[in-house]
Amino acid sequence: MKVNFTIVRPADGEHADIYAAELTEQIRDAIDLLENGRGNLPCTKDTQVILLKTDEIYYMESVDKRTYVYTKDECFETKYRLYELEDMTGAHFFRCAKAMIVNLRKIRSVKAQFNGRMSAELLNGEQIVIARSYVKDLKRKLGL
């Protein structure tokens, strides 16, 4: 892919123009990166505030009116609700159940279940369930 870079005056404002034959997943990722950057999410663990990079997050889950953020090996709590996290994270995060959002980049494999749901194995070996109402959207996002 050809890339052009031009320095502009601050008064003109920074912007990016993308010319492509089609909107691919790589183009979506580039747009997401330009619009959202590699954001940080403030979380707590043992009264310590930790800024997690969004690309470290495997999934986020709401349990008993609390929101938890899971990385490869650890669990953190955040003050944000899931609907707020959907807006904060970006295109590679997907609502897979009413109480869960998963990072699509952390899915190793998916498997259909007998009841219309799917299960997904994450890169850290953890299994999550994709609710029936979200399966069609997940298949579309994964290109299945």
Image (spheres, helix red, strand yellow):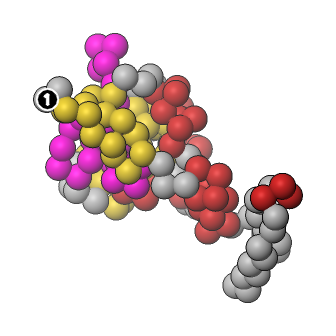
Residue lying at 27% horizontally and 40% vertically, measured from the top left = 50
- Where does the image place residue 125, in percent across and percent down from the top left? 21, 55
Residue span colored magenta: 54-76
Asked whether 54 or 51 is in front, the reply is 51
37 part of magenta stretch: no
Visible residue check, residue 140 = no
Quarter of the image for residue 68 reads top left
Asked whether 144 or 59 is in front, the reply is 59
Q: Secondary structure at mark 1?
A: loop
Q: Residue furthest top?
A: 65
Position of the N terminus by quadrant? bottom right
Asked whether 13 or 40 is in front, the reply is 13
Relative vertical location of residue 129 with respect to residue 126 in this rendering, above or below: above
Q: Is residue 49 left or right of residue 106?
A: left
Residue matched to label 1 = 46
Question: Amino acid under label 1?
Answer: Asp
Residue lying at 78% horizontally and 58% vertically, measured from the top left = 10
Visible residue check, residue 66 = yes
Residue lying at 86% horizontally and 58% vertically, measured from the top left = 12
Relative vertical location of residue 106 with respect to residue 80 in this rendering, above or below: below
Q: Residue furthest left?
A: 46
Relative vertical location of residue 92 with respect to residue 6 in this rendering, above or below: above
74 part of magenta stretch: yes
- Where does the image place residue 62, in percent across and percent down from the top left? 35, 24
Give the mark count. Answer: 1
Residue lying at 38% horizontally and 50% vertically, measured from the top left = 53
- Where does the image place residue 110, in percent across and percent down from the top left? 38, 55
